[in-house]
Image (cartoon, coloured by chain):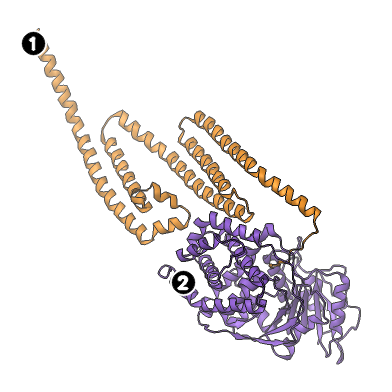
Amino acid sequence: MWEQVKQALVDSTARFLTRFANLLPGLAALLIALLVSAVLAWILAAIVRRVLAGLHFDERLGRWGFSSLAEWSPMKSPTRLISRSVAALVIISGFLIGIAAFDFDWTHLFVQKTFDYIPDVLAALLVLFVGNILARFLARSVLIGAVNLNLQYARFLSIGVKWIVIVLAFAMALEHLRIAPSIVELAFGILFGGIVLTLALAIGLSSKDLIAKSVERDAKKASSEPVEDPLRHL
Amino acid sequence: MQEPTRDANVEADPGLQLTDPTADQIGSADLVVGILAESDSNAIEKVCDALRRLPGPLRIAVLHDDQQQGPATANSEATQEHAFVFHVPSLLAKRDAPVTGILSVSETYQSVFSAAEKLQARGCCIIASKLEVATTPWAWRIAQPLFESQADLVLPHYARRKFEGLLNASIIAPMMRALYGKRVNNPMGPDFGVSQRLFEKMLAAKAGGNQFNSMASLTPTALCQNLQIIEVHFGSRIYPATDWSNMSSALADVLTPVFVDMERNAPCWQRTRVSVPVRVIGEPLLLDQDSTAVDTRPMLESFQLGNRELQEIWSLVLPPATLFELRKLSRLSVEQFRMPDELWVRIVYDFALAHRLRTISRDHLLRSMTPLYLGWVASYAHDLTVAGAMSPERRLEGLSLAYEAGKSYLVSRWRWPDRFNP
């Protein structure tokens, strides 16, 4: 019996060692891939950082209306954010290459699924980016237009418009990523409706006095003699 | 000289294109008069009658938009005593909508220039405004210097009340004076006399594209090409009533071609140092100044609201020192509020620079200037309505001098926008 136990142990050890030996090239490949990608990431990040610094990217971004991006960035520098994102992308790619080196079915499947998912991620990022630009542009248009119409709640209107567009873009991005689509749809409906209702209530309540004043002013105007505005601009 | 056909109302293409047969049928003219002001048949006939009484053998083509007006009915040919006037409405660009925006106005001007070129005219004049008291023949008064003084551009010098033409008085006229070195009072007309040499240049420039505005670019083109400019004294024109709800659109509409020209002509105006007056013909007409009080409170409220809410936009355009001054101003009461000319001039120059650099969307930029402009108007109204106030002429002369004094600031910022940022 001991002979059989001994044999089973030897067989198991041999199988384990064989499997481990089979795993070693893949592990080495993963380590090398990670090492190379880290070096490549460091070089690429340095190049990107230098190019963006040369283009005064941080200042330009501020001028284009993306000053809030600096707040989310490491050391308040969007240049660093982009260079680090590039580095992370390269390292992730290296990791995927390393994983693919293992000769297992599940690693192949994992890599394949990851690569299949990349177009969705890119599309979601694009939707977020365009949504952000659009939100800022519309917010600025509304702010300037409302100030020129002498509306005291100009800022509030502008923020409302900005968040409506951002929420819409975010929901579209999540839809692309196929993350809990039914929940996203429901949540978006509630959130969007909530923002619109909040805006309507806020404007309605704050304009109550304005409308009263306006009616009062119109009544006064009607009772008094019409005064001609002597200003001619054009 | 070729005799024109009496039924010269030949249909042309609806746009600016003129077909050769039309021009051949009409023949040639010495002067082309484009009547762009809204006028009925009687008013046009009065202008034509006045033109017919002009001395000398002149052939005058009248372009107008009144479809009911038929061909000339009076004298059929030019004699030594009288001019011959004939109508060519078909050569004027036709629009479905009324001519309102500065772009459509520019296209109509362009069609007058095209017609003048087709008719080989020696000059053309454009009547785009109505006078309070029509002086006859005022179309000829604006065309006369083209023939008798070899002028290339004849500009109107309207008699104005203190609160009329404020956009021109606050920005366009003093800035053109400081930039190009000639003291013209109404660089954007809208009534002009244009020589053959100048309208040919305008047509060539327009063909080159590049956002060329046939109305706004006339005076800068003449100034940069060193062409002869003469001003003619006119009565007061009827100014359109202010549409307060559309103020920012009007501001953006008018300033866009001015700033575009400024960018195009930068090599020209950077050489100019001082300003000189231009020759003026006629006697100035004195008007009773309006004594109606101006309510500056809404304009100040707009300025204060802008100062509160548009800081993030203004901070992209204006240097910190200017923003600080504006914040101080916004805390003043209605009675104390005064915007110094130097500050206003720097603001205008900074907006012109931001327009050139496309710091933000150009439309946003110009619209965000509205509260600042209203602040200046409020300050100007205060200056002219307080007891012992100076005359509007002296007040505006001070502003023009401030524009000239601030030009070195503009040139420095224009040349080194990143380095020179006080």
Q: Which residue is mark 1?
A: A3
> Do the residues at discs 2 and 1 belong to one chain?
no
Mark 2 or mark 1, whichever is nearer to me: 2
Which numbered disc covers residue B413?
A: 2
Q: Residue at x 58, y 38 (%)?
A: A198
Amino acid type assigned to the residue bearing label 1 in the image: Glu
Q: Secondary structure at mark 2?
A: helix
Q: Note whether B414 is above or below A156 in the view shown.
A: below
Q: Is residue A123 left or right of residue B75?
A: left
Q: Which mark is residue B36?
A: none
| A131 relative to B113 in the view: left or right | left
Q: What residue is rendered at 60% in x and 36% in y?
A: A197
Q: Colour of chain A?
A: orange
Task: Answer left or right for A134 relative to B250.
Answer: left
Chain at tag 2: B
- Going by the numbered disc 2, the residue's amino acid type is Arg
- Give the chain coloured purple: B
Crowd class of label 1 (few under 14; some 14 to 19; many from 20; radius 10 Å): few
Q: Position of residue B322 (x, y in %)?
A: 49, 65
Residues at circles 2 and 1 in contact by the CB criterion of under 8 Å = no
Which residue is situated farthest in the left direction here?
Answer: A3
Query: What x and y, as percent, mark residue B77?
Result: 87, 85
Q: Position of residue B73 (x, y in %)?
A: 91, 78
Q: Is residue B353 left or right of residue B44?
A: left
